[in-house]
């Protein structure tokens, strides 16, 4: 008789940039019955691949991504084919690798406040 393999549980890695909320993020993920593990932000992409996560969260941190010597992630993370969610610092960290397109023009029009009476 063949027994079914145990179900593979989801695993989310949280790359910690030093945010005071990293543990809160991990706890909230665990409350959804998903295994989460907090790892250092500088974990190489090869090691992340070996951990076989279903997703990655880039947490926040106290630094600015524009500061000299600011914490940086391994850009190879984005080539692993794993979904990545950036929160605060982590989101701006992603924007460094995937710049947001800016409009070629801007409008000089001022916004108007429209007041309506609901009598």
Image: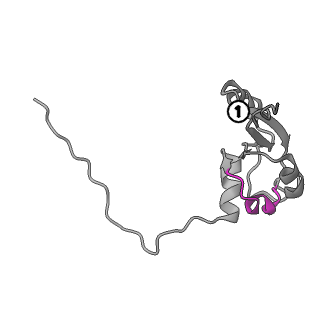
The image position of residue 85, as x and y in percent, is 66, 47
Residue 80 sits inside the magenta stretch = yes
Q: Is residue 68 visible?
A: yes
Range covered by the magenta-colored residues: 72-83
**Residue 81 as seen in the image, left or right of residue 37:** left
Specify whether 102 is left or right of 22.
left
Question: Residue 20, relative to residue 102: is it above or below?
Answer: above
Is residue 20 visible in the rendered image? The answer is no
**Residue furthest out toward the front:** 1
**Residue at coordinates 81% horizontally, 56% vertically from top-left?**
72
Q: Quadrant of the N terminus?
A: top right
17 part of magenta stretch: no
From the image, tell me which residue sits under label 1: 25
Q: Residue at x 35, y 67 (%)?
A: 108
Element marked by disc 1: helix
- Image coordinates for residue 94, horizontal then vertical, percent: 68, 57
Percent x, y of residue 111: 31, 55
Q: Which residue is at a point 74% across and 55% down the rendered structure image? A: 65
33, above or below 86, in the image: above
Q: Residues within 10 Å of mark 1 (few under 14, many from 20)?
A: some
């Amino acid at each position: 008789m063949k027994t079914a393999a145990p179900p593979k549980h989801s695993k989310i890695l949280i790359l910690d940039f030093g945010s005071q909320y990293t543990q809160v993020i991990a706890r909230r993920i665990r409350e959804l019955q998903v295994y989460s593990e907090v790892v250092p932000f500088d974990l190489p992409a090869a090691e992340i691949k070996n951990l076989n996560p279903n997703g990655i969260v880039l947490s926040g941190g106290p630094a600015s991504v524009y500061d000299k010597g600011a914490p940086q992630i391994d850009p190879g993370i984005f080539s692993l084919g794993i979904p990545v969610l950036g929160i605060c610092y982590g989101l701006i960290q992603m924007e460094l690798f995937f710049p947001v397109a800016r409009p070629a023009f801007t409008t000089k029009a001022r916004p108007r406040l429209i007041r309506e009476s609901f009598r």
